[in-house]
């Protein structure tokens, strides 16, 4: 009888914890983290942007090498942010969760070193435990650089 009581208690505790774990990674919580990220970019809060990534998170603009780890992500974003002290407005057209990933179709609006730009982007965010594990970005890099007033040779992000 004791074994069944102990087994029942363990089962009850494990099933009680399961909804809490799932709630942390619900579609709504992932969208909430994404909205925090959008607000941080608009506010030019580069520390907040980086802090929304997992410690070993990845930021990958698909046309350049990925940036791995929160410190490296902060360094990259803060360096780019110096040219856009007014922040970047992520003007979202569509956002949703598909197969556990957040998809954002948007236009990024910014002024970078005096050059106004608007770049269409699709971002895919893998958010787990309230942090961005990976953020993949798809956009026309040549158009972005042109709008930023940056030549390909002076690209502040591309690996040489």
Image (cartoon, helix red, strand yellow):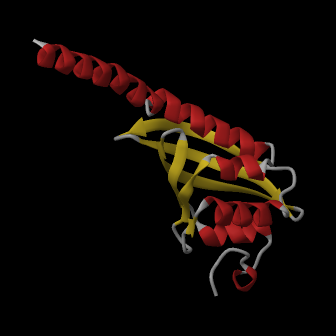
Up the image or down, 57 lies above or below 98; here it is below
Q: Nearer the viewer, residue 79 or 71?
A: 71
Q: Write down the quadrant of residue 56 in the picture.
A: bottom right
Q: Write down the quadrant of residue 57 in the picture.
A: bottom right
Up the image or down, 98 lies above or below 122; here it is above
Q: Position of residue 159 (x, y in %)?
A: 62, 82
Specify the quadrant that holds the C terminus.
bottom right
Residue furthest right in the image? 114
Residue furthest left in the image? 1
Q: Write down the quadrant of residue 33 in the picture.
A: top right
Residue drawn at 71 percent across, 71 percent down: 145
Residue drawn at 50 percent across, 35 percent down: 30
Specify the quadrant that holds the N terminus.
top left
Up the image or down, 68 lies above or below 38; here it is below
Q: Position of residue 6 (x, y in %)?
A: 20, 18
Q: Nearer the viewer, residue 6 or 15?
A: 6
Q: Nearer the viewer, residue 151 or 61?
A: 61
Q: Position of residue 123 (x, y in %)?
A: 53, 51
Up the image or down, 120 lies above or below 152; here it is above
Residue drawn at 29 percent across, 25 percent down: 14
């Amino acid at each position: 009888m004791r074994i069944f009581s102990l087994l029942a208690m363990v089962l009850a505790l494990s099933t009680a914890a399961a909804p809490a774990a799932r709630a942390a990674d619900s579609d709504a919580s992932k969208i909430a983290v994404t909205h925090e990220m959008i607000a941080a970019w608009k506010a030019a809060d580069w520390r907040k942007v980086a802090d929304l990534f997992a410690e070993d998170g990845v930021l990958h603009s698909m046309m350049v090498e990925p940036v791995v780890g929160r410190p490296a992500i902060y360094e990259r974003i803060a360096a780019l942010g110096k040219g856009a002290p007014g922040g970047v407005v992520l003007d979202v057209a569509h956002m949703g969760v598909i197969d556990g990933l957040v998809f954002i179709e948007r236009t990024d609006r910014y002024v970078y070193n005096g050059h106004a730009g608007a770049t269409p982007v699709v971002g895919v965010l893998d958010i787990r435990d309230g942090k961005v594990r990976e953020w993949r970005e798809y956009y026309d890099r040549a158009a972005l650089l042109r709008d930023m007033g940056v030549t390909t040779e002076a690209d502040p992000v591309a690996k040489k």
